[in-house]
Amino acid sequence: MDEKEIIKIEDVNGQIIEVELVTYLVSQDKKNTYIVYTKGETEENGEQIIYVSKIVANKDKVKVAEIVDDNEWLNVQELLKAIANN
């Protein structure tokens, strides 16, 4: 069984939270990086809730940001599909 990788991230509210890393994604143009993670939450049907956030670096800090642009979100979905099809 794979060992879970627990990391700490700063969320959009500035709080430091521990999450389980699923994977990192890099945009095709290599300009943006995303983190795919879970907080250990599940849906009523037992499926695990997965989050995807953009990684933003400001000076000496790295934090996550919500993906708000529809085109950017479509690009992230394509990256996820590529992983799922491998």
Image (cartoon, rainbow, N blue to C red):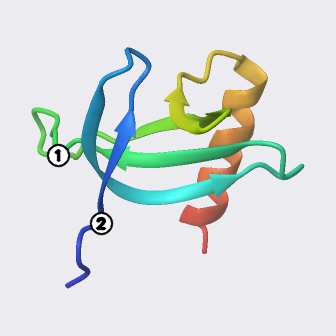
Q: Nearer the viewer, residue 51 or 64?
A: 64
- The kind of residue tagged 1 is Gly
At 83% from the left and 44% from the top, the residue drawn is: 31
Q: Secondary structure at mark 1?
A: loop
Please report whichever mark, 1 or 2, sits nearer to the chain's N-terminal start.
2
Amino acid tagged 2: Glu
Which residue sits at x=89%, y=49%?
A: 29
Residue 68: x, y in percent? 63, 15
In this rendering, the answer to whether 59 lies above or below 68 is: below
Specify whether 74 is left or right of 61. right
Q: Position of residue 47 (x, y in %)?
A: 21, 46
Q: Is residue 28 above or below residue 52?
A: below
Along the horizontal axis of the image, is 13 left or right of 85? left
At numbered mark 2, what does the secondary structure look like: helix, strand or loop?
Answer: loop
Tell which of 56 and 49 is nearer to you.
56
* Disc ID at residue 40: 1
Residue lying at the far front of the rendered structure? 60
Q: Residue furthest right?
A: 29
Residue at 60% over, 23% down: 67
Q: Position of residue 85 (x, y in %)?
A: 60, 67
Q: Residue at x 40, y 59 (%)?
A: 22
Residue 18, which numbered label? Answer: none
Number of marks in picture: 2
Q: Is residue 42 toward the left or the right of residue 19 in the image?
A: left
Q: Quadrant of the N terminus?
A: bottom left
Relative to residue 1, is residue 72 depicted above or below?
A: above
The residue at which mark 2 appears reads as 5
